Image (tube, rainbow, N blue to C red):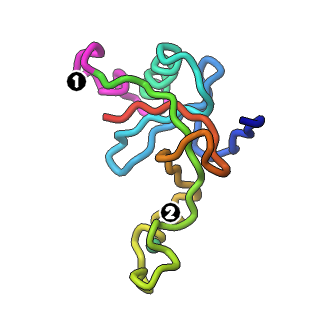
C-alpha cells in the first residue's frame, strides 16, 4: 500500500479532526474520510448529526446506541457512472448516472486497499 490521498469532497464537516458526512437517499450511511478509531468516528458522526442536521444523534434518539451497527473501516473509490455504463444494456437515460452527476461525487465502498484509486473511509450503515 502506497500513500493515499484523501479526496477533497464538498459536503463534509470536520469534527474532532475527522471529516464526516451523511450519504444515501434516506441518510442511512455515515461516512468519514480516512481510517480512525471507531469510537472517535462515532462521536464525530454524532456531532455532525447534532450541529449540522439538528438531530439528537445519528439515530435521532430513536434507538439505543448499544444496538447500532459497528463503524467499519472500508475502502472507497469515487464513482463517475453506474455499473452498467458503457454496456449494451445501458439506456440513453439512466437515473443512477444522472444522480451521480448531480451529486458531484459518489462513493463506492465495495473494494479493498488493492482497488485502484481506493482511499480509506469509516462507514456506519443503518
Ligand atoms: Zn448509468
Decide if residue 72 is on the left or right side of residue 6.
left
Q: Give neighbour class at mark 2: few <14, some 14-19, many 20+ (Cα, 10 Å).
A: some
Camera-nearest residue between 52 and 78 = 78
Q: Position of residue 108 (x, y in %)?
A: 50, 50
Task: Determine whether the residue tagged by mark 2 lies in a helix, strand or loop.
Answer: helix
Assess whether residue 52 is covered by the magenta stretch: yes
Identify the residue at image location x=62%, y=47%: 10
Q: For disc 2, does the CB lie below 8 Å from ligand 1?
A: yes
Assess whether residue 13 is covered by the magenta stretch: no
Q: Position of residue 74 (x, y in %)?
A: 51, 35
Magenta-colored span: 51-67
Q: Position of residue 113 (x, y in %)?
A: 61, 39
User: Which of the labelled discs sits on residue 100, or is there none?
Assistant: 2
User: Which of the labelled discs sits on residue 32, or is there none?
Assistant: none
Task: Determine whether the residue tagged by mark 1 lies in a helix, strand or loop.
Answer: loop
User: Which of the labelled discs sits on residue 62, or is there none?
Assistant: 1
Task: Give the residue at the far right of this rendering.
Answer: 3
Of circles 1 and 2, the one toward us is: 2
Amino acid at each position: 500500500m502506497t500513500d493515499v490521498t484523501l479526496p477533497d469532497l464538498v459536503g463534509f464537516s470536520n469534527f474532532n479532526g475527522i471529516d464526516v458526512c451523511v450519504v444515501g437517499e434516506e441518510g442511512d450511511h455515515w461516512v468519514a474520510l480516512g481510517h480512525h478509531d471507531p469510537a472517535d468516528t462515532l462521536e464525530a458522526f454524532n456531532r455532525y448529526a447534532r450541529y449540522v442536521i439538528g438531530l439528537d444523534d445519528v439515530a435521532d434518539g430513536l434507538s439505543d446506541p448499544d444496538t447500532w451497527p459497528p463503524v467499519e473501516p472500508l475502502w472507497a473509490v469515487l464513482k463517475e457512472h453506474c455499473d452498467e455504463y458503457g454496456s449494451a444494456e445501458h439506456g440513453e437515460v439512466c437515473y443512477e448516472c444522472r444522480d451521480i452527476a448531480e451529486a458531484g461525487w459518489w462513493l463506492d465502498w465495495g473494494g479493498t486497499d488493492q482497488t485502484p484509486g481506493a482511499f480509506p473511509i469509516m462507514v456506519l450503515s443503518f
